[in-house]
Amino acid sequence: MPESRIHRFGHHAGFSLIEVLVASTIFSMGLAGLAALLLVNIISSADARSEGIATMAAASLAEQIRLNPVAVSQYLNPPETISTICTGVDICTPGQQADYDFRLWQVELAGAIKSARGLVCHDATPLDGVEGDDHCDGAGPLVIKIFWDSSGKGADTDMHHHRFVLELS
């Protein structure tokens, strides 16, 4: 009987250590791929959210410009400070209203998209430009350009710069 006992335990009835290590490695690589996929999905969702906010912000400013067409020059060359807070109770000139609306728009834009900056300019090639160099050439149609950096690392990283342009007709 002892011989049959030895014979029975001599067969390999389970997994070897190498097989377990290979299976664990394959499983770990699958989990790492899934984690990378989830991370890309989160980043893409954040970028899509910012793009949507920029679209809505540009449309909102375009509507303000259309409602106050005599003050287009104020949107093109906004002053450093606003002279009057126009809230509907105060009587404001079209220029004062444009200054107030544009500054309020910039504050709301920067609050909705971190590090966003928007401007209004005439540009014959509106799809060019980056943060810090908007490439507004002063010719062509009136456009709204919005720039932001989604990396959160500031202007030194050029891989994550975003731009949204709306041409006003």
Image (spheres, helix red, strand yellow):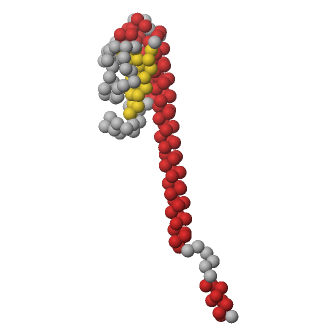
| Relative horizontal placement of residue 24, taking residue 5 as reference (left or right) | left
What residue lies at 65% left-to-right and 93% top-to-bottom?
3
Q: Position of residue 72 (x, y in %)?
A: 39, 10
| Relative horizontal placement of residue 23, taking residue 79 as reference (left or right) | right
Q: Position of residue 150 (x, y in %)?
A: 41, 36
| Relative horizontal placement of residue 9, taking residue 44 as reference (left or right) | right
What residue lies at 33% left-to-right and 24% top-to-bottom?
134
Examine the rendered structure and indicate whether residue 114 appears above or below residue 82. Answer: below
What residue lies at 52% left-to-right and 71% top-to-bottom?
18
Q: How many marks?
A: 0
Name the one closer to the observer, 81 or 134: 134
What residue lies at 44% left-to-right and 8% top-to-bottom?
68
Q: Position of residue 38 (x, y in %)?
A: 52, 46
Name the one closer to the observer, 118 or 129: 129
Picture quadrant where residue 65 is located: top left
Q: Position of residue 8 (x, y in %)?
A: 65, 85
Viewer can see residue 91: yes
Check the picture and name the quadrant holding the N terminus: bottom right
Examine the rendered structure and indicate whether residue 152 appears above or below residue 27. Answer: above
